[in-house]
Amino acid sequence: MRSVVTGVGGFLPAHVVSNDDIAQLVETSDEWIVERTGIRSRRRADEGQATSDLAVAAALEALTNAGRSPADVDLIIMATTTPDLTFPATAAIVQRKLGAPPGIAFDIQAVCSGFVYAMAVADNFMVRGLSRCALVIGAETMSRLLDWTDRGTCVLFGDGAGAVVLEPRAGQGTTADRGILGFSLRADGAKQDLLYVDGGPSTTGTVGKLRMQGNQVFRHAVVNISEAVLAAAETAGVTMPEVDWFIPHQANQRILEGVAKRLGIDGERVISTVAEHANTSAASIPLALATAMADGRIKPGQLLLLEAMGGGLTWGAVVLRL
Ligand code: UT7
């Protein structure tokens, strides 16, 4: 049994924030941000627009594209580091807002790697026959976690959501099968200090702000991600030349080019949305996938390689045939 992506959707809040807008708040420039990150703009959720609202919009588009309705959904896994509330899980809020029937719904917290982790967890539910129609969603309002006086972080992140519908299909057990073919997940909690939020219910009683030693995270990114990608590819039984599209977490153009180069994947096979979306954490991969499917680049049947790295540190990769 394979977990097959049957629909993809994305949603971006309307409000565009340019690099020049941020240069009004902190000492930075469009030139610096573009050169060091590739980012030109990002979206910001309006006041009153919660993570679940972005998630619902992306989920509805994914369900429509799959020819499904909320009534079919029996599992919702939400990857987010910016939940609406400390509890309930934002997945349960999304279930309510979609009007989906009672089923399984929970959140996954692996920060920017959340979507990769969520796909791996969903795959395990599906191949065990525990779900017929799952929504895997990455949705974030990162703007709410940013310290808008810290130029080292506030220029990097954006808000958005992406979702996929997964359904089980019998495969032949070959790499020609549609569906998730392999994945690898990693975490190294000893590197917490490199990227974390300095608040939480059981410590400060506050939400906290994002803190990052950007150049240290950068140092680990290319090597860590490449290792996880090769491990996922080995599990799946595929090689890099077979990959049609590389869909990396959209943290920084320099990181995604560095990983692609190390893996021998040429730039024409890399999906990059970092210029307009910035880093939307767990939303970035499904949003990039939705963008490249909507513009016709990615087509059913193609072999996709997804990867991410984020707070924890966590990182991982998924290989799937669309
Ligand atoms: O998704 C989660 C994973 N996160 C990431 O993958 C982020 C990884 N890190 C990065 O993308 C990069 O490290 C950054 C874009 C955050 C920073 O780029 P960098 O080339 O590593 O720069 P740096 O941190 O080494 O800083 C170089 C200089 C510093 O000034 P001094 O100390 O050399 O005088 C910074 O203060 O750039 C300065 N700087 C800025 N200058 C203008 C830092 N942020 C800014 C800014 N505008 N926004």
Image (cartoon, grey):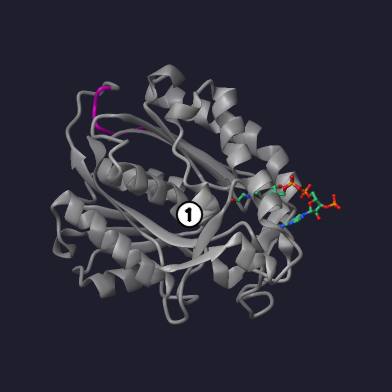
- In this orientation, which residue lies closer to the viewer: 289 or 6? 289
Q: Amino acid at mark 1?
A: Ala
- In this orientation, which residue lies closer to the viewer: 144 or 102? 144
Quadrant of the drawing holding the C terminus: top left
Q: Which residue is mark 1?
A: 282
Residue 93 image position (x, y, % from top left): 34, 73
Q: Is residue 43 left or right of residue 57?
A: right
Up the image or down, 206 lies above or below 72; here it is below
Q: Is residue 217 left or right of residue 18?
A: right
Up the image or down, 292 lies above or below 95; here it is above
Residue 222 image position (x, y, % from top left): 63, 34
Kindly tell me whether mark 1's CB lies below 8 Å from ligand 1. Answer: no
The residue that appears at 24% across and 31% down in the rendered structure is 178
Quadrant of the drawing holding the N terminus: top left
Q: Is residue 135 left or right of residue 191?
A: left
Residue 112 image position (x, y, % from top left): 53, 52
- In this orientation, which residue lies closer to the viewer: 38 or 20? 20
Crowding at dot 1, Cα within 10 Å, few <14 / some 14-19 / many 20+, comes out as many
Residue 296, quarter of the rendered image: top left
Q: Is residue 55 left or right of residue 70?
A: right
Up the image or down, 40 lies above or below 254; here it is below
Residue 185 in view? no
Region of the chain picked out in magenta, as a range: 176-181
Residue 4 in view? yes
Would residue 95 be counted in the magenta stretch? Answer: no
Q: Secondary structure at mark 1?
A: helix
The residue that appears at 41% across and 67% down in the rendered structure is 13
